[in-house]
Amino acid sequence: MARTKDASKAQKEPGRMKQMWQVFQMTRRYDSTAQWLMLLGFLAPVLVSLGLALWLSEGNGFTIALWVVAGVLAGLLIALVILGRRAERAAYSQIEGQPGAVGAVLRSGLRGGWVGNEMPVAVNGKTQDAVYRAVGRGGVALISEGPSSRTKRMLDDEQRKVARILPNVPVMQLSVGDDEGSIALHKLPAALRKTKKALTKPEVLAVSNRLNSLQTSLPIPKGIDPMKARPQRGKMR
């Protein structure tokens, strides 16, 4: 019985190649330039390696073959990296503007030592505007979701709370949206990584634990998972 269950489970789960093909199809649907960037990323190292092979191999067929294989492998790697970046951007474009979108990015898209929580630290029940918090080497980042005209006060209130608890930790404000001075959802991880380092890794953990221990739970839904978000019919058209 156990073997039957394992076999049926293996049949239900798509293979790695099928998963990559599904990601490619989804990315191409929302980003028509992705396939051409991937093709360019693949061909560039192949052509470079072929040119170097003809120049440096002195007619040795085995050396030429090694250069070409190295170029193909490098091209595949670059194409996969481009696919990953464009797929992430396409996934975020499906949830941009929806409540909880910033929380989804903080949960699954942060790098460079930044840690965030998918649950906001402040929320307006009427407008669904929210403020999220992330902690990293740059200090504490307060990120608003909603029009800047409505979320500015919420950001200032949260900054005063953090400054009262951790007076020596830098606090920055970021706004995600379409307003002037705001950043697009898919640019949020890069904006955090570009901040000047002010904390060590142990200090990041200590600050995060300190803030989390004082955080009260809010009766609000969790963020959206961008990899499980359903496409919006309007954008597909």
Image: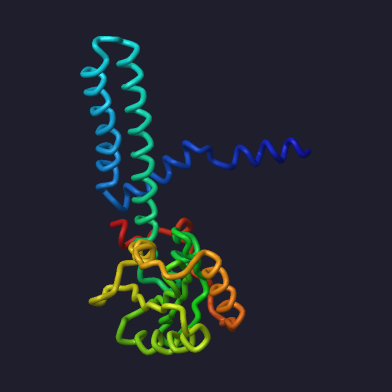
Image quarter in which the N terminus is found:
top right
Residue at image coords 39%, 54%: 88
Q: Nearer the viewer, residue 12 or 166?
A: 166
Colouring of the image = rainbow
- Locate residue 124: give its quadrant: bottom left
Q: Residue at x 73, y 36 (%)?
A: 4
Say whether residue 232 is visible. no
Q: Is residue 179 left or right of residue 26?
A: left
Q: Nearer the viewer, residue 9 or 225?
A: 225
Residue 39 is situated, as x and y percent measured from the top left of the image, at: 27, 37
Q: Quadrant of the C terminus?
A: bottom left
Q: Is residue 56 above or below residue 215?
A: above
Count of numbered marks: 0
Q: Position of residue 203 (x, y in %)?
A: 53, 70
| Residue situated furthest top in the rendering | 60
134 horizontally vs 76: left or right? right
In front here: 226 or 114?
114
Residue 97's image quarter? bottom left
Image location (x, y in percent) of residue 205: 56, 68
Q: Residue furthest right?
A: 1
Residue 230 percent coordinates (x, y): 43, 59
Left or right relative to 120: residue 54:
left
235 or 67: nearer the viewer: 67
Above or below, 48 against 157 in this view is: above
Residue drawn where x is 48% and y is 61% of the image: 113
Instruction: Residue 129: tell me if it is visible.
Output: yes
Q: Residue at left 24%, top 23%?
A: 52
